[in-house]
Amino acid sequence: MSFDIAVRKSLGDCSINVAFQSEAPLVAIIGQSGVGKTTLLNCIAGLLKPDTGRIAVEGTTLFDSKQQIDLPPNQRNCGYVFQDSRLFPHKTVKENLLYGMGRSDGSIALSLGNAVSLLDIGSLLERKPGSLSGGETRRVAIGRALLSNPKFLLLDEPLASLDNARADRIIETIERLRDELAIPMLYVSHDTNEVARLTDTVVTLD
Ligand SMILES: Nc1ncnc2c1ncn2[C@@H]1O[C@H](COP(=O)(O)OP(=O)(O)OP(=O)(O)O)[C@@H](O)[C@H]1O
């Protein structure tokens, strides 16, 4: 089972109650703004603690309220591409990519060269994040997450605020990750047409 998730979490006025199991390589999480999509990803990454529930990925239990299992984020082997990318502004693209390299105990173990060619970011390596376009920034953020050698990826609205051409390139990149690396991914979006290109497996938060 790629994902076996049951999470209840209240945060401010927001309350999420979601459960799904999936073998699919890519699961889309959709729902309107403010419904709790990022909150769910933060629970899976271990940045927030669910009130109750169970989170297992690829057969490894990351959280289980009944069994009192709650692995810290750095033991979850999770690559997280944040909605706002969160690259280190003072480091070059190459330094950002190298930052998390090999921190996790995953199964993809990409080299820097492989990641750079997969994401087509070779010409950006000596640049600082402040000089990158939105699409370039997103590709570097995906690269940094992949190079940590994760067991799974969380992608939070990776097309947000990109024009059509740049969004298309990111979608193509994610299709390559899905098909070439076969790394399980949770892909958050509010756009049903966008996710239809990537997967039939859709979980709707409401
Ligand atoms: N630390 C917090 N304290 C209180 N409320 C919070 C906190 N973090 C998030 N919320 C609220 O929880 C709700 C869900 O937020 P979340 O970011 O998970 O939504 P989302 O579905 O990802 O939204 P978007 O599509 O706009 O990114 C929102 O109403 C938000 O204001």
Image: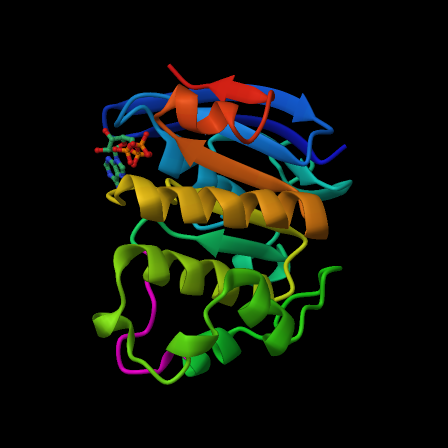
Q: Compared with residue 28, is residue 96 higher up or lower down, i.e. above or below? A: below
Give residue 63's position: percent from left, percent from top.
62, 41
Give residue 50's position: percent from left, percent from top.
48, 35
**Residue 174 part of the magenta-drawn span:** no
Q: Compared with residue 33, is residue 157 higher up or lower down, i.e. above or below? A: below
Query: On the image, which quarter does residue 148 sit in?
Result: bottom right
Residue 119 visible in the snapshot: yes
Residue 42 visible in the snapshot: no
Q: Residue furthest top?
A: 206
Side (left or right) of 24 relative to 34? right
**Residue 86 part of the magenta-drawn span:** yes
The part of the chain drawn in magenta is: 85-93
Query: On the image, which quarter does residue 36 sit in?
Result: top left
- Residue at 43% from the left image edge and 83% from the top image edge: 95
- Residue at 23% from the left image edge and 24% from the top image edge: 13
Return the residue nearer the eye: 159 or 148.
159
Ligand 1 image position (quadrant):
top left
Prevailing secondary structure class for the magenta stretch in the rendered image: loop
Side (left or right) of 132 relative to 100? left
- Residue at 27% from the left image edge and 56% from the top image edge: 134
Q: Quadrant of the C terminus?
A: top left
Count of marks overlaid on the render = 0
Q: Residue furthest front?
A: 165
- Residue at 58% from the left image edge and 30% from the top image edge: 27
Q: Compared with residue 129, is residue 81 higher up or lower down, i.e. above or below? A: above
